[in-house]
Amino acid sequence: MTMKPTVLLACIAFATGAHAAPPAEYQCLIEPYQKIEVRSPVEALIEAIHVERGSLVKKGQALVRLDSGVEQAALASARYRAIMEGQVKSSEARLHYARDKHRRRDELHQQNFLSAQDRDDAYAEMRVAEADLIEAKDNRELSALETKRLEELLRQRTLTSPFNGVVTELMQHPGELAQTGEGARAILKMAQIHPLRVEVVLPVSLYGSVKAGARAEVIAEAPTKGSYKASVKVVDKVVDSASGTFGVRLDLPNPGGNIPAGVKCRVRFL
């Protein structure tokens, strides 16, 4: 009995599909998207810490408040100087008087009732009064600029979160001195956990077959078991010749924060 070609092709296709190997899996590690240490930009006493270890925080949320009594007093003084009118008003009055005085003496000089020296003295007084008014206005403007500078310094006394994340460790407490410079102890540590970062090392034979934007399935190990969809974000451009491998980074969405960072995993490229 001769098998028809159509039936033969169908059998071959079925046999091939039945014996097709599943996609290969590779060991990986789920890590926070980024980890930072929050330090103070100025040396100051820690007045309050608004979070605890494990606290979920939003971008821009206040984390730490530093002592700012001196800065607040200086800011209040600068704000008052910036709106003071006394010096400007008095300078305007002196200038008005000096101009009238010069005008009258100039008229008297033209009528030969006053010497040129007296007229020139009045003119000099008028120019000095003009300069005094300019200086008074400049001082007021400088106070306004000083106000902005002190507002920025005061803003630095409140440390805020640069991203949505979680506090992983408190390293200092209220009452301690926050320091700056190399080697200064951080106040707290935090991590961004949405999205997560998946790091995997692949054999060089796969170089070129895994590209940025490719989809993958990440299978998390204990304590959190489950599979999640991820996408390739970075493919290293440099291969490690010693091990014959290259690195790939995937982004793993974690909007609910249910996937813990630091968990081992396996990845399967789709």
Image (spheres, rainbow, N blue to C red):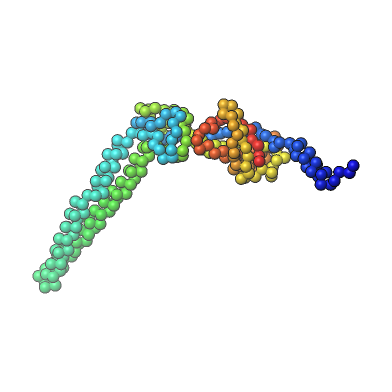
From the viewer's side, name the closer residue of 175 and 218.
218
Q: Residue at x 61, y 33 (%)?
A: 219
Q: Position of residue 241 (x, y in %)?
A: 70, 38
Q: Residue at x 47, y 36 (%)?
A: 165
From the viewer's side, name the closer residue of 226 and 267.
226
The answer to whether 129 appears left or right of 159 in the picture is left
Report which quarter residue 150 is drawn in: top left
- Furthest residue to the right? 1
Report which quarter residue 107 is drawn in: bottom left
Q: Residue at x 75, y 37 (%)?
A: 18
Report which quarter residue 199 is drawn in: top right
Q: Is residue 116 visible?
A: yes
Q: Position of residue 100 (x, y in %)?
A: 14, 64
Q: Which quadrant of the rendered structure holds the N terminus?
A: top right
- Furthest residue to the front? 1
- Furthest residue to the bottom? 111
- Furthest residue to the left? 113
Q: Which quadrant of the rendered structure holds the C terminus?
A: top right
Q: Residue at x 26, y 42 (%)?
A: 76
The image shows residue 98, relative to residue 50, as above or below, that is below
From the viewer's side, name the closer residue of 48 and 94.
48
The answer to whether 66 appears left or right of 263 in the picture is left
Numbered label tally: 0
Q: Position of residue 60 (x, y in %)?
A: 41, 40
From the viewer's side, name the closer residue of 19 and 9.
9
Q: Position of residue 7 (x, y in %)?
A: 81, 44
The image shows residue 101, relative to residue 148, as above or below, that is below
Q: Is residue 185 visible?
A: no
